Image (cartoon, rainbow, N blue to C red):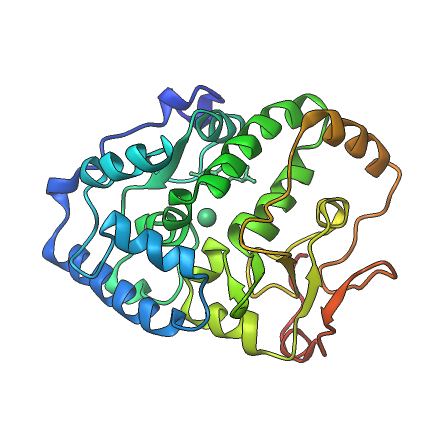
Amino acid sequence: MNSATGSNDPRDYLVPQGFEAYTDTDHATWRTLATRQREILKGRIADQFLEGLDRLGIGETGIPDFRVMNERLRAATGWEVVAVPGLIPDLAFFRLLADRKFPAGFWIRKPEQIDYIEEPDVFHDVFGHVPLIMQPVYADYLEAYGKAGLVAAEHGALKRLARLYWYTVEFGLAQTPQGLRIVGAGIASSPSETVFSLDSASPNRIGFDLARVMRTLYRIDDFQETYFVLDGIDAWPSLDLDRLIPLWKELEGQEDIKPGDLQPEDRILTKGDGSYHRAKPKSAA
Ligand code: HBI
Ligand code: FE
């Protein structure tokens, strides 16, 4: 069974990590990526992310063995990382998150792909996503996200949830006592977007608002035109369904918002000048 046959049962996608099959080149690729990223993230990434890397022993030695990493992860928040071949159908994905299982690609990019890959590999998924799952508040948010996704499927709200994931789990920023910090995995695993998301004058940076995010389109092929900022490192949105379901209903009558557009009620931290994206050919929003 596989996504071609449309299975939504996560068990149809789980594979062994194949830790013993990694080559020296694979581990060297991980070391290159992890060493470089830890350097660039200094002063830009939330402290809790670095704490998670250290507590999980995700370092510069090589690709982590999920069996070893999961012992620490389970002990901290009851989560575990499970290996999958790549992106899996939404419902299978939501079911795993609802069960405190994070699906991570088992393969790592080739040396010649060091700077950009289409699909998430083990570096994006484990280095980018897993450290924050050591934080109980975030661990609860991710489980609630999975449960909300399963219900969203019944309310025609899958794209709302995809946007929420994109603008928080993947590309979220947060206010912290030390200043604006990265919390999103898509940023945390990308050297260039780590710098762009905080330093560039091009993107908007707007205070997080659940309804606003669920109306906002996003780019999958380039830096974000707008970043949403959580009010604090623990300020992940509460996703109780008796609030979400009426909200989805309300949003049905409202226009989608283009990635770079501002709204009158936005809490604007930075109004971007859009210079980066203006200089690039238009792509699907
Ligand atoms: N599958 N393995 C994997 N990893 C993801 O991050 C992922 C996925 N399937 C769907 C998906 N993300 C997004 O569409 C979520 O918004 C559901
Ligand atoms: Fe991701």
Q: Is residue 39 left or right of residue 4?
A: left
Quadrant in which residue 274 is drawn: bottom right
Above or below residue 162? Residue 37 is below
Q: Is residue 155 left or right of residue 165?
A: right
Task: Determine if residue 84 is in view.
Answer: no
Task: Determine if residue 68 is in view.
Answer: yes
Residue 1 picture location, percent across and down? 38, 19
Between 163 and 49, the one lying in front of the other is 49
Residue 240 picture location, percent across and down? 67, 29
Q: The C terminus appears in which quarter of the rendering?
A: bottom right
Q: Residue at the spot x=40%, y=69% of the render?
A: 41
Q: List the single residue furthest toward the front.
A: 177
Residue 174 picture location, percent across and down? 57, 60
Numbered-mark total = 0
Q: Residue at the spot x=80%, y=49% of the render?
A: 256
Q: Is residue 267 left or right of residue 162?
A: right
Residue 196 picture location, percent across and down? 53, 74
Q: Residue at the spot x=44%, y=27% of the render?
A: 96
Q: Residue at the spot x=46%, y=70% of the render?
A: 44
Above or below residue 133? Residue 224 is below
Between 264 and 280, the one lying in front of the other is 264
Quadrant in which residue 152 is drawn: top right
Q: Is residue 196 left or right of residue 201?
A: left
Quadrant in which residue 61 is drawn: bottom left
